[in-house]
Amino acid sequence: MTGMRFNQNLLKVPLYIGGKSIEAVKEEFGLEDVIKMASNESPNGPSPMALEAIQRALKDAHRYPGIGERDLRRKLAGRFGDGFTEDNFVTGNGGSDILRMITQAFLFEGGNAVMCSATFPLYHIFVTMYGGENRQVPYTADYCHDLPAMLAQIDDETRIVFLCSPNNPTGTIITKSQLDGFLAKVPDHVLVVLDESYNRYVESEDYPDSLDYIRAGKNIIAVRSFSKTSGLANLRVGYLIAPIELADYVRHAQLPFHTSDIVLAAAMASMDDYEFHEHNRKTILAGRAFLRDSLRALGLSCLDSHMNSVLLIDPPIPPAELEIALLRRGIIVRHTAGFGIPNGVRITVGTPEENAIFIARTEIILREKLGIPAGTSVESKLKLMERV
Ligand SMILES: Cc1ncc(COP(=O)(O)O)c(C=O)c1O
């Protein structure tokens, strides 16, 4: 390939390594049963109404996509109500594609983007891809976005601030008063991207409603996904909500026929499946409380989460080793080094049965690795070790 010219920005982009798939782990470790708790997917499968819609739409698989994209935007506008029309929305091939479009639209000719150092890695990957400078700001002692420090990083060349709330992988949120204080100080030339891919799992009353800011015409884009609560991660559909001028501008970065009518039909059908969403939400809220309490009962520390995963911090054996030990026992979780937290392991909430199996196998691994005999509790042994 001598003589060819390569895009130097692309060469700097680290390849995104997703969570391992169930099939890959079965093959690699020779296992028959594998549980995946690694990619923040829905444990309850897709909505049956989405599956039926896919069947109906398949008969037009030979056609290019038609009006499904507009129909989804209309349906979203109807759902969000007052002040929104279909023009406030842009759809994408997953929330990832939305983040790609936004970054491509704003990061050019030497701009920079400010983000938390421990967050969803696609932000810094896209900023690098489009030739921008990443300003990754360390998180606070309690694993939250350090908003004052992020403000201090903004200068004349800052184009985007990425805020992820709930934040992947910490599960922490930015409260309304924190966001209000931050937005009051962000200069007008900066776009604030609020990634709300996990917003449906938040219970806190302090969680701000981004739609209010968008209705008020602020320089804010909210990013949402059908992958998580709607259980459609494999179909790839997400969207943004923005003031119309911003949405119209970002649309310039959209690929023609970027997602199929089949996928869009599934997304729209799932929006009508209230029962499915409620069931999913209940599974997650109960499951994350169970995981948090059970991990703490073992003497391990984990953060309070507002999303569908729990972050284990400083496990008593190195996180990469714990990840591998769990893989060998048929459970896929995620060491969070690639998310800026080298001392963490992220566990996606599964079904009640999966959660219980995860806790049982984690206990077995800790007993084995730390040499804790059957009569002694893991918690008391860990407390002893702390004192030494
Ligand atoms: C914070 C955050 N934003 C966006 C996405 C993108 O999701 P998708 O492309 O599946 O819609 C993810 C996926 O894990 C995420 O964690």
Image: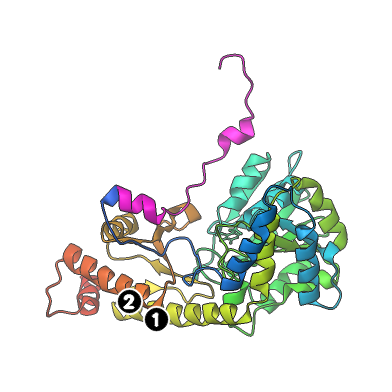
Q: As drawn, which residue projects farthest toward the top?
A: 3
Q: As drawn, which residue projects farthest toward the front?
A: 59
At horizontal 15% and vertical 79% (from top left) the residue drawn is 376
**Which range of residues does the magenta coloring cover?**
1-27
Which mark sits nearer the N-terminus, 1 or 2? 1
Residue carrying label 1: 290
- Indicate the amino acid at tag 2: Ala
Quarter of the image for residue 217 reads: bottom right
Front residue of this view, candidates 102 and 268:
268
Inter-mark Cα distance, 1 to 2: 9 Å
Q: Which quarter of the figure is the C terminus placed in?
A: bottom left
Q: Is mark 1 on a helix, strand or loop?
A: helix
Q: Nearer the viewer, mark 1 or mark 2?
A: 2
Q: Answer left or right for 73 relative to 376.
A: right
Quarter of the image for residue 55 reads: bottom right
Image location (x, y in percent) of residue 381: 19, 75
Task: Answer yes or no: is residue 304 visible.
Answer: yes
